Image (cartoon, coloured by chain):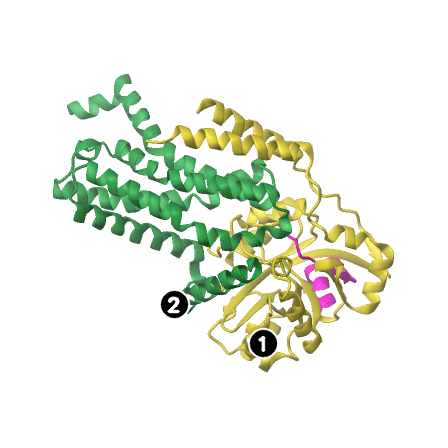
Chain colours: A yellow, B green
Amino acid sequence: MRVGAGLVVMAIVAGTFADRPRPREEITLGGYRVLAADFHTHSSTWSDGSVTPWGMVIDARYQGLDAIAITGHRQTLDAKWGRWFSAKIGGPIVLVGEELPEIPHHVVAVGIHTTVDSALPVREQIDDIHRQGGIAIAAHPGKFFWPGFAPVMTTLDGTEVCHPATFDYPQFRPELEEFNRRTGAAAIGSSDFHGPGRLGMCRTFLFVREVSAAGILEAIRAKRTVVYGRDEQVYGDPEMVRLADADGRLRQRANTDYPMSVLDRLSQLLGIVGFALLVRGVRL
Amino acid sequence: MSIESVATVTPAGELRQRKAAVTLLRRPLLLAFVLGCGVSLLASGRLTLRLVVDGTLSFAFVPLCELIAYAIVYRLQLGTRQIVGPARAGHYAEAVDRYFAGNTPWLWWMLALMTATAILPARRLGSLLAPILFTAPIPIALSVRFDWRLFRHDGRSSGQAVFDIILQRAIAWSLATAYFLGVALTTRDFFYTFVEMGQEIRSWVGTML
């Protein structure tokens, strides 16, 4: 049992040494500052996530994100904690958000101040989001959700075209693409982060005039976004896509499947063997 | 000053208390720690201190809910006086320690999940959802079997043991679900979870075929 505990400690030491923030260089294209953001994330404080709001703020740094929206289910408290914490440590921009997980339409509100009543019809939900100065994003709008979004096709500000589910279920990607085409809204990449995977695994590159929450929301309203999805697909404003593709750095930054180092593999191996010994030792 | 209070301030009493605290907390803490390590592996592919600590804090509610639920069952067991062993002797810490050993199947299951996490690329971790749903009944069944044997060993009748298990699960799982899903949980969402699970399994089976 002691050997197991020792191996687990060594695994954590190796993993902590290997854990370095992804390099974040300032990118300016076509006169716009380019920011990487994830607009759909869930924390462990009452929103079936696995990482605390402050842990997500730190993780955003490690994943090379400039901004995140913390979007609790029907609540904004965790987002406000995250924003407060990030301001204290000089972390990424944290936008207060909320996911309204109604059936059959899930709406992500970003840049709001107070909780939007999820009992409202979808049109009124989006009106309230806009009244608060926020933007409304259709979350993972697969075919199942299309009837629910029918009344608001022209009022949505963005729709998710890259979502982790597109990597597991190939049939999901064309559904998201088709929905984005029909709405004409900004292309959004979001990780819908609950714990498994990486924060920013699907991310949105924003071409902003000003590095601030207001600047980010303005870029989405103006549809100045670029998203890299499954099979090297790229979505967004054609002019911004041209700039991004010519530069090449955004495509590189979009990939979170970076190679594991020797220390990473050591951390995994020692951890798994260590836990096996520990668990074997705690039998009755 | 009573004899009991003298006993608690003597070095021997202090040592006993400390030992009881360790016995009470070691397995609940191990469970939270394993969950924390799982979070770190899932979210970063490695065991890194910042995510291990964060994940342990985030999932501390799991052993906490189990402790609350078992405390209620334990009180009921003592009340009926049909119990033997550490629980009968009023050694709550020892009883908790034995009870939490019933999580061992879950710990093995999580270890298997961690191994899969280490093998799969980050973008494919979502594909673990269906195997998780398919295999979760195994640790559920094994831990129920473990608890049934424990309660029977402690002198509970078959019926009482079944009642204790159902009561403990009902309290612990309700509390944990309410905390984890929080304000998002409505009856409609709850039932929709099963619809989503069904879709997930169908999709997975479709991929396999």
A176 in the magenta segment? no
Q: Residue B16 or B73: which is nearer the viewer? A: B73
Task: Work out whether A248 lies above or below B97.
Answer: below
Q: Quadrant of residue A208?
A: bottom right
Tag 1 residue: A146
Is disc 2 in contact with disc 1, using a CB cutoff of under 8 Å? Answer: no
Expressed as whole percent of the image width and height from the top left, the position of residue A189 reads 67, 61
Q: Residue B208 or B182: which is nearer the viewer? A: B208
- Same subunit, labels 2 and 1: the answer reads no
Tag 2 residue: B187
Expressed as whole percent of the image width and height from the top left, the position of residue A264 reads 64, 35
Q: CA distance from mark 2 to mark 1?
A: 23 Å
Q: Chain of mark 1?
A: A
Q: Is residue A22 left or right of residue A100?
A: right
Q: Is residue A237 left or right of residue B122?
A: right
Q: Quadrant of residue B44?
A: top right
Which residues lie in the magenta part?
A: A199-220
Q: Is residue B70 left or right of residue A50?
A: left
Q: Is residue B86 left or right of residue A123?
A: left
